[in-house]
Amino acid sequence: MFKITIGSKTFEMKTINVTVWNEYIHEQTDPAVAERYPKGIHNTIAEGLQPYNFNIRTATLEQPEHGLTKEVLDQTDVLIWWGHLAHEEVADEIVERMYERVLNGMGLIVLHSGHFSKIFKKLMGTTCDLKWRIADEKSRLWVVDPAHPITEGIGEYIELEEEEMYGEFFDIPAPEQLIFISWFKGGEVFRSGCAYHRRQGKIFYFQPGDERYPTYHNHEIIKVIANAVIWAASPHGAAPTFGNAEPLEDIN
Amino acid sequence: MFKITIGSKTFEMKTINVTVWNEYIHEQTDPAVAERYPKGIHNTIAEGLQPYNFNIRTATLEQPEHGLTKEVLDQTDVLIWWGHLAHEEVADEIVERMYERVLNGMGLIVLHSGHFSKIFKKLMGTTCDLKWRIADEKSRLWVVDPAHPITEGIGEYIELEEEEMYGEFFDIPAPEQLIFISWFKGGEVFRSGCAYHRRQGKIFYFQPGDERYPTYHNHEIIKVIANAVIWAASPHGAAPTFGNAEPLEDIN
Amino acid sequence: MFKITIGSKTFEMKTINVTVWNEYIHEQTDPAVAERYPKGIHNTIAEGLQPYNFNIRTATLEQPEHGLTKEVLDQTDVLIWWGHLAHEEVADEIVERMYERVLNGMGLIVLHSGHFSKIFKKLMGTTCDLKWRIADEKSRLWVVDPAHPITEGIGEYIELEEEEMYGEFFDIPAPEQLIFISWFKGGEVFRSGCAYHRRQGKIFYFQPGDERYPTYHNHEIIKVIANAVIWAASPHGAAPTFGNAEPLEDIN
Amino acid sequence: MFKITIGSKTFEMKTINVTVWNEYIHEQTDPAVAERYPKGIHNTIAEGLQPYNFNIRTATLEQPEHGLTKEVLDQTDVLIWWGHLAHEEVADEIVERMYERVLNGMGLIVLHSGHFSKIFKKLMGTTCDLKWRIADEKSRLWVVDPAHPITEGIGEYIELEEEEMYGEFFDIPAPEQLIFISWFKGGEVFRSGCAYHRRQGKIFYFQPGDERYPTYHNHEIIKVIANAVIWAASPHGAAPTFGNAEPLEDIN
């Protein structure tokens, strides 16, 4: 946070602290993925977000505490999550730590196969299951809420030549704000951009991003993620208090 | 309403009064439509609904007061609406009468091109505009809320070999319950089953049913409409009172 | 399910199977509660629901499998839940069994202190924490969605002379349908009637019912619970399938 | 819009253009109101918003085109609306102009008795009726969505010593985001902070602000309005296109 004064007006500038988390396995075991994302999906996303002036760090599964120490999470305004093969290897203690941070105001952006992550399932209260197909298939993400800031700078839809199909039924609570619906060439649709509030925190699920495709090199996809960071980092209210409460008015 | 006693238990049986409204122009001017719907879309829908034991009447634009006299509307639990060419010919006075009835608890089911009807636009507060294309095109309506009673008896989707495409952005308020999302072969998606409450009344918009196609001869489409009738006729609460109100508690 | 034919019309009659669950501890340990609810809160609710022609059984914590065997849950259309002191004593295996049944279409009505039950917290994905106060305090439940069937037969509000206060912030996801908001004399408000869908199942949380007060002898409270049973037992759609899916259209 | 470069980072600064509209009648006819708001409610709000660095102009009913020329509205990012006595004197043509601007992305903040304004009723599609009482009565606005940016800097509630009571049932569509619920000493509750999207535009209704009370001199009330301005001015997506659409995919 810093201030700038121009003429008689002073602006508060808040730099958003973003942590991009990746399980970082495919890139180290699959040569085709390694070629596509030589420094890992997390670094491709981080580089894509460079123009947006966030303070970005990355973290991966293999690091101590998966790179998500209490200090890191306390300093994170928005956490971006990519995982696929190793959801079960994420320690419950770290999941609980993220959960508390979301309830206390940290934004969370869950990408693609992260739908099955422990943290997303715990926050949704459902299985987050879905249909899927790997067929190098065209998809098109249609904007269905053009008032939402996450759609800024995007046209009526985003077209991806090749992506993994995710299809309905997607076993999530009805999105509080449904922002994108995807069309897939094979005949399915998917609620592919879904926003939620949980206590003081904001959550956005975004469907694209299978490791087989260069999706995170796509500027429109990065733009949506950047918009989601700004949305998820927007201010929130005070922490509520719970438990036994004295009356505010005379009861008798 | 009548009662049946079986052993020690008494059941109240409510017969739902349904009015199927149709502007009834295409069928009288276009031979192809006349062949498809010889007695009019309204009568095809009414016949389709026969197995569901509703009390059904029909009404059309050309009748006095468009067949929607005060008496008819007062006796209507659920109004089904099909219109296309002549939205502007529906008298404002009748629109106002329907509007009052919806707010006071009458269910309203708006079909297909009824998205541009005066009554739907007035209740939504938006233009209800959309994209469209007539290309004898396959569509598939995916269930995205399988807890909703309107989906009873329907599989994971309904497939229609040929329908008019309606595409996003659909200029409506975000549905309170989004029940169907449609896939169209030409590349679009559409929020095709949308539920709303307005004061004591329930509203359901359902996309299929262009006059060029035999959609209302499709048993699954009729099943959805029947389910929607039952949902829209389900009980509601008391009429609220408005205006200057005495305090219920001692203020001083 | 049975059928009745009257003249040319045949009606399908579905009898709703309700299980009322109670931890049943206060009534066995606190003489004042025992006097108020001599056969337990579960039996008071079951007796209150008699006029509504449900098939009702009860179940309690102390029974084997808490009275919620697989067979019982499979035969339950709607489960009503009251618990307070012993949430942690409900076995995780039984919670998982209930969870699966809700996702597969069983209705769930969570009463009062059940907000802290394992099953409700798991389905909500939040802590479900709140403010509370025991002060024999007047509350008033205002209807804010008079189109909802749960409000049938209720006036503009229900007044309770004495209840426990529950106050905001209530740490739940925003209700999909907010039906009642409570006023408390001591100065708080509470979202006291909240409806959700989870996959094929319907959930209703209803705030009143502390064991210190005769709330479940109140006909309006029982009426709301009966309405909620009918709503939660209303039909649902087919079970979705998940996993790898063949394309429905030619992709190439 | 201007840019600031600090080190290697460049920030885009958008100054929000706010128009505060007031019918400005009470202040010119009622000495008590004139004393409370000597320059009119609009100027009190505008002065209250000074610290937030918006570009603010005001407009009133008596001006040509009510001060809302096409040019003014085109340059307005967020319109704040206060009206009470003269809703019917607002020209339909100006209402239509505002309506188009909201659909095209202008934010709209409707205050207090503006619930009955033509523009709010048109956008809601309902009567927006409610209960009311003038009794110099305490109210308390409870935050029920602390993740929402509109609650930034506000505690768990705002207390107003004296305000007009507005009570349920409030005849609006269920808010897409319900942010505040008010408690009134006389026994009522009210959904007092309600957010909606309409196509590209964002709308916030906020209950406090009867002309009899010094509500717009209250810093917390002004803070909520400032937060709402920032929220309503946040980016939106592209203008959708409507009408006949060529297929994006090969249909045959």
Image: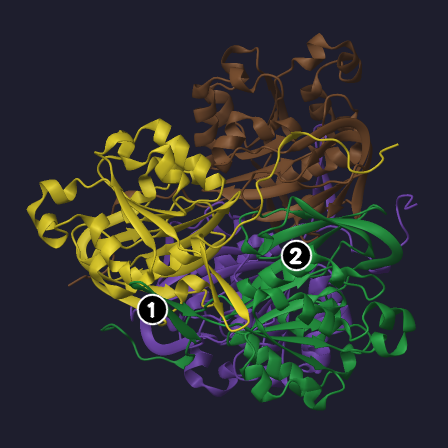
Chain colours: A yellow, B purple, C brown, D green
- Res A157 label: 1
Crowd tier of the residue under label 2, counting other residues whose Cα lies within 10 Å: few below 14, some 14–19, many 20 or above: many
Amino acid type of the residue that numbered disc 1 sits on in the rendered structure: Tyr
Amino acid type of the residue that numbered disc 2 sits on in the rendered structure: Gly
For residue D47, which quarter of the picture?
A: bottom right
Instruction: Identify whether B221 is placed above or below A119.
Output: below
Which residue is pictured at 33% across the width and 62% down the height? A52
Can you see residue B42?
A: yes
- Circle 2: element type: strand
Q: Position of residue B249 (x, y in %)?
A: 89, 43
Q: In this orientation, which residue lies closer to the viewer: B104 or C87?
A: C87
Q: In this orientation, which residue lies closer to the viewer: C138 or D26?
A: D26
- Circle 1: element type: strand
Can you see residue A125?
A: no
Q: Position of residue D133 (x, y in %)?
A: 86, 57
- Res D193 label: 2
Instruction: Chain letter for mark 1, please.
Output: A
Q: In this orientation, which residue lies closer to the viewer: B208 or A240?
A: A240
- Left or right, B124 with reference to A30: right
